[in-house]
Amino acid sequence: MDVNEIIQKTVDSTVIKLKMAKLIKDDDLSPYEKTVQILLSYNMLKKAGSSKAAALVTNVDKALETMKQDPYYQIIPIMYFDGKSREYAAEQMDVNPTTISRNKKRLLSQLTVLLFSDEYIDKLIF
């Protein structure tokens, strides 16, 4: 084995260890980050007119439908579809902003599982 091969193997091994320790991040978005991006783009996706956009909007709508009974469900449309702030959502729902943040994260996690279940499981296990 020549010096270049030894260096390459060492670098590859080090990068894998750093990724596993979550000290460096893959270029790909996590399922959670994808969920956030989809919600931020939701209104534009509805107008896009492509079959992929329509399918994605349908999947998001179905996932959101399963969550409508949640007392904090309105956080999603207020913040992502209407583009309002956390403080605005808190005022509308008569709770404090910390409650909005906590429940937004919880709702986004639920949506992530519904929209990207396979990727979510892969990220947890592998």
Image (cartoon, rainbow, N blue to C red):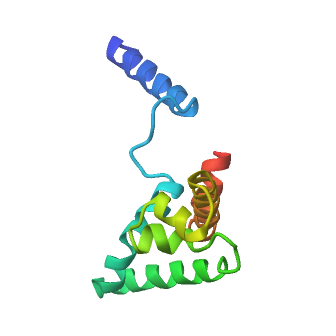
Q: Is residue 61 above or below residue 72?
A: below
Q: Is residue 107 left or right of residue 86?
A: right
At 49% from the left and 24% from the top, the residue drawn is 13
- Viewer-proximal residue among 7 and 54: 54
Q: In the picture shown, does residue 93 fall above or below 126?
A: below
On screen, residue 79 versus residue 119, left or right, reads left
At x 57% / y 74%, what residue is drawn?
A: 74
Q: Who's the residue at 38% across and 68% down the image?
A: 83
29, 62: nearer the viewer: 62
- Residue shown at the point (51%, 33%) measured from the top left: 19
Q: x, y (%) of residue 24? A: 45, 32
Q: Nearer the viewer, residue 11 or 124?
A: 124
Position of the N terminus by quadrant: top left
Point out the image quarter for the C terminus. top right
Q: Where is residue 6? Give x, y as percent.
A: 41, 15
Toward which corner of the image does residue 107 lie, by quadrant? bottom right
Tell whether 95 sits left or right of 86: right
The picture places residue 2, in percent across and down from the top left corner, at 35, 13
Work out whether 21 lies above or below 52: above
